[in-house]
Structure formats: structure tokens, C-alpha cells
Amino acid sequence: MQHHEETLDAYVRRVAADPDAIAVILVGSVARGTERPDSDVDVCLVVPDDVFESAMAAHRVIFDERSDVTYQGGCVDVKLATVAFLEAAAERGDDPVRASFQDARVAWARDGYDITGRVAAIPVLPPEFWESRAISFMSEVRWHGTDFLPQAVASGNTFLPHHAAAHTVSAGGRALLALDRTLFRGPRCLDATLATLDRKPDGYSDLARRLVTRPSRESADAYVQALEDFHPWPVDRAASASIFIRDNELPWLTGILPPELS
């Protein structure tokens, strides 16, 4: 919308005069074209390493700016980053950070910095990552849904069945995203992202909702079986056990983050 672009232009004009500013990257709903009239303008401000480190120490890597806003109630929501941050995000960033740079636009960059190329590389994952990720998440589905959840129900504990159900549905949803080569934007966006997929089990949303709201052996079995029938997962249950242990109990040894944090 015009008032968002006017606000962005005003912010860029001011920031470009700061010698510590390297680039301004437009992200969020305005970049994606899904903004509301009252949406904030989300930007990533790229700064030198020492400036970023000082901001980290002062707990000021995210903040609002209102001096450039041209519409009532809005703000420029600023997150700081560095060139090294952008490179690391492209190399090993988790899904939410990669997804945050989808449709991003470099609004301004100081001469001598290839910010556009670095930003474009962030949301991209090689094909082999997706298959490995789908296997990891399906392994979680099997163990949380068919092993941990029945034990939790039998224990009579109120919390544990919901904990197992939430992990089962989260892993199942992310397995479907991996099959569709779709980045995970975060838990609050999971349902909405899954709704955009053409390929998912029939009645998936109802099965997931039933499991989360009324965790039981029956609701878990129905959810897991729907996923099992939907796709020929290239790993059996025995292998899933070792994959689950590797991914969830041995990150301290392997140095690799658990799938749910990737």
C-alpha cells in the first residue's frame, strides 16, 4: 500500500545517511503483499559486526522506529543483522529464518555489498534436505503417536497425552511440508500453511484437531495411519527408532539440532 512504501522510503533516506548502515531489507507482510492498512513495515537493517555485537549486549537487536511513519498507528519494526548473519542463514538457517526472507526485497544497499544475492540464497534448500527432513519428522510421528502417547494415556497424567499429541501433529504437519518442499514459518502459521497444500491426507485437519483436543489411542492411531497410507515413506518403523534417537537424544553428541528446531 502506498503509505507503507512512503514510510519505507522515509526510513531508508534517514538510515542511508548513517555510516553504520549497510542495507535495508523489506520483509514481512508488506514484502509478501499480504499487509493490512494498519500493518507495520518490517525491515532487516544490516549493520557491521561490532554494531550488532553491541546491540546484542544491550538487548536491542529488535526495536520499533516511529519517526518516519506516514500513517496513524504504524511503525517500522526493525531487526538487526550482519552480512555474516545473512551468509550463515543461507548455509544453516532454520526454517523460520529462511521463510522470513521469502519474497524479501532489498530496499537499499551500500555500494560494494552483494546483499541481493545473499538474501536470495536464504530461502533455498537442496532437494536432499527435504527428503531427509520428511523421514526425520515421520519418525517422530511414529514414536510420539504410537509409543509415547499410549503410555501417557495409560499413566493418567493430564499433561503428557497433550504433550505427545502436540508433538505428533507438529511433526506430521512438518513431514507434509517437507514433501511439498515448503518452509515452516512457525507454529502459529502451521495450520494456515498446510491449508495451502494440494497434497495431504483426506480429512487431515479434522484428524489433527481431534488428536490435539482429545488425545487418545484411537485419535492417535487414526492420525498416524492417515499419514502412513498417504505416502510410501522410505523408512520402516525399526529404522525410525534409530532416526528418532539420533535426532532427539543425541544432538549433544552430533552437534546437529533436533528437526523441530531446524
Image (cartoon, grey):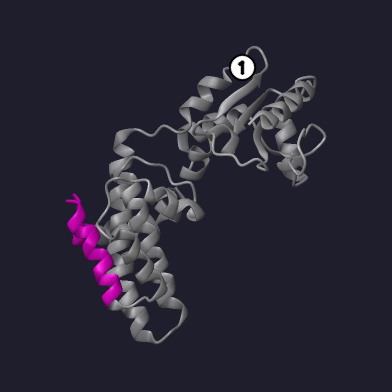
SS at badge 1? loop
- Check residue 185 for magenta coloring: no
Q: Is residue 66 above or below residue 237?
A: above
- Residue plotted at (27% across, 64% down): 142
The secondary structure that dominates the magenta segment is: helix
Q: Is residue 31 above or below residue 212?
A: above
Q: Nearer the viewer, residue 92 or 227?
A: 227
Left or right, 12 with reference to 232:
right
What segment is highlighted magenta in the picture?
218-239
Q: Position of residue 28 (x, y in %)?
A: 58, 38
Amino acid type, label 1? Tyr
**For mark 1, does the 10 Å Cα neighbourhood hold few (<14), some (14 to 19), or many (20 or more) residues?**
few
Q: Which quadrant of the view contains residue 108?
A: top right
Left or right, 227 with reference to 25:
left
Q: Is residue 140 above or below residue 189?
A: below
- Residue plotted at (65% across, 40% down): 37
Residue 249 visible at all: no
* Residue wearing tag 1: 113
Q: Nearer the viewer, residue 34 or 19?
A: 34
Q: Nearer the viewer, residue 8 or 178?
A: 8
- Check residue 229 for magenta coloring: yes
Q: Position of residue 255 (x, y in %)?
A: 44, 48
Q: Which quadrant of the view contains residue 211?
A: bottom left
Q: Position of residue 124 (x, y in %)?
A: 41, 32
Residue 254 visible at all: yes
Left or right, 61 with reference to 206:
right
- Residue plotted at (49% across, 38% down): 98
Q: Nearer the viewer, residue 98 or 64?
A: 64
Q: Is residue 177 above or below residue 103?
A: below
